[in-house]
Image (spheres, grey):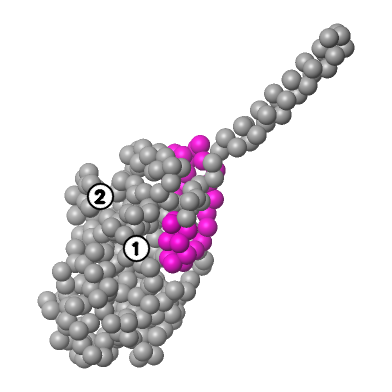
């Protein structure tokens, strides 16, 4: 082999090493896609209070503690979000309730925060008509759904907690109106105002916010806890149940341990009325104690 040929081969090898090395550096950051719904006051996409929701406060703190990922946010409705979580991709939702069905394809984090449970919202003008289902300030959802003319509005693919989900599963389709749209709750509130629904499921903070956006006076509405349901619900972060998703959950759990929980609690409590806020902050330390998944 001539000296000239040897120099050419050495140059070729060096060029190959450099070329192979470039992609390693460029792809070192995995892209983690956060799936967010327009769910005031957890997340607020538009208006004067944009980005002032509880998750709007929590997510930047998580991102800061996960510097090894490139973070991107995707706005989706609940149905689309669950569909994406079931695909082999690195996607995570920071506002999930745990259910046995979701656990088949979603890797769940430790508890992220606690919210007041979903309830039933009726119009005050219908209080007398629906009085047979109101027992000690709570709504007997099971008895209501057993009546022939019941019409209940709910958001498609959302979990309302184990007790409520079980009842909805066994409810006749003509009694349950499921909305899939991006503005699902707002549409359900309008349907209720027009007399097409008697009751709507949801979080009171969310309902009150959306009612204002829809031009509905919140004082015209009455929110009732559901008989037999727990007063609070634990919220988790869920990622696609893939190798990458489970690795992300492991890192997210580490990040959650270092979060200032008082800040997270207060970011949510600010959206409650004074009486509910005081009770929530009083009860909350108990719910932030270590709690295994169901």
Q: Which residue is mark 2?
A: 293
Residue 35 % position (x, y): 47, 57
Outermost left residue: 136
> Image point 20% across, 60% down: which residue?
279
- Give the residues drawn in magenta, as a range: 59-86
Viewer-nearest residue: 58 or 4: 4
In the displayed structure, 187 sits above or below 128; it is: above
Q: Which residue is mark 1?
A: 271
Q: Please identify the quarter of the rendering in which residue 229 is found.
A: bottom left
> Image point 27% across, 73% down: which residue?
169
Asked if residue 43 can be seen in this view, the reply is no
Q: Is residue 96 magenta?
A: no
In the displayed structure, 21 sits above or below 206; it is: above
Asked if residue 254 can be seen in this view, the reply is yes
Quarter of the image where the N terminus is located:
top right
Residue 285 % position (x, y): 21, 49
> Image point 31% across, 46% down: which residue?
110
**Dot placed on the residue nearer the N-terminal end, 1 or 2:** 1
> Image point 36% across, 81% down: which residue?
177
Q: Is residue 17 left or right of residue 7?
A: left
Residue 40 % position (x, y): 41, 65
Q: Is residue 81 magenta?
A: yes
Q: Secondary structure at mark 1?
A: loop
Viewer-nearest residue: 24 or 214: 24
Q: CA distance from mark 1 to mark 2?
A: 27 Å
Q: Dot 1, how many residues are within 10 Å of its Cα: few (below 14), some (14-19), or many (20+)?
A: many
Residue 284 % position (x, y): 23, 53
Q: Secondary structure at mark 2?
A: loop
Q: Is residue 73 left or right of residue 248?
A: right
Outermost front residue: 1
In the displayed structure, 51 sits above or below 79; it is: above
């Amino acid at each position: 082999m001539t000296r000239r040929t040897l120099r050419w081969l050495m140059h070729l090898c060096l060029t190959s090493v450099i070329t192979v090395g470039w992609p390693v550096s460029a792809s070192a950051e995995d892209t983690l896609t956060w799936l967010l719904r327009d769910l005031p006051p957890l997340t607020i996409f538009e208006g004067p209070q944009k980005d002032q929701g509880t998750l709007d406060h929590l997510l930047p703190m998580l991102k800061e503690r996960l510097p090894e990922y490139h973070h991107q946010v995707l706005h989706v409705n609940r149905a689309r979000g669950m569909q994406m979580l079931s695909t082999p991709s690195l996607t995570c939702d920071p506002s999930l309730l745990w259910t046995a069905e979701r656990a088949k394809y979603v890797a769940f984090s430790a508890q992220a925060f606690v919210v007041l449970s979903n309830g039933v919202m009726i119009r005050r003008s219908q209080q007398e008509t629906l009085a047979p289902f109101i027992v000690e300030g709570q709504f007997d959802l099971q008895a209501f759904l057993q009546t022939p003319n019941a019409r209940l509005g709910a958001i498609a693919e959302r979990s309302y907690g184990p007790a409520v989900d079980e009842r909805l599963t066994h409810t006749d389709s003509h009694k349950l109106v499921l909305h899939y749209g991006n503005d699902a709750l707002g549409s359900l509130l309008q349907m209720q105002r027009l007399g097409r629904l008697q009751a709507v499921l949801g979080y009171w903070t969310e309902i009150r916010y959306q009612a204002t956006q829809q031009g509905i006076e919140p004082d015209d509405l009455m929110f009732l806890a559901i008989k037999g349901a727990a007063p609070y619900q634990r919220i988790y972060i869920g990622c696609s149940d893939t190798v990458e998703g489970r690795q992300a959950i492991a890192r997210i759990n580490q990040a959650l341990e270092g979060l200032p929980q008082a800040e997270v609690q207060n970011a949510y409590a600010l959206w409650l009325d004074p009486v509910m806020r005081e009770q929530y902050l009083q009860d909350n330390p108990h719910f932030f104690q270590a709690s295994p998944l169901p």
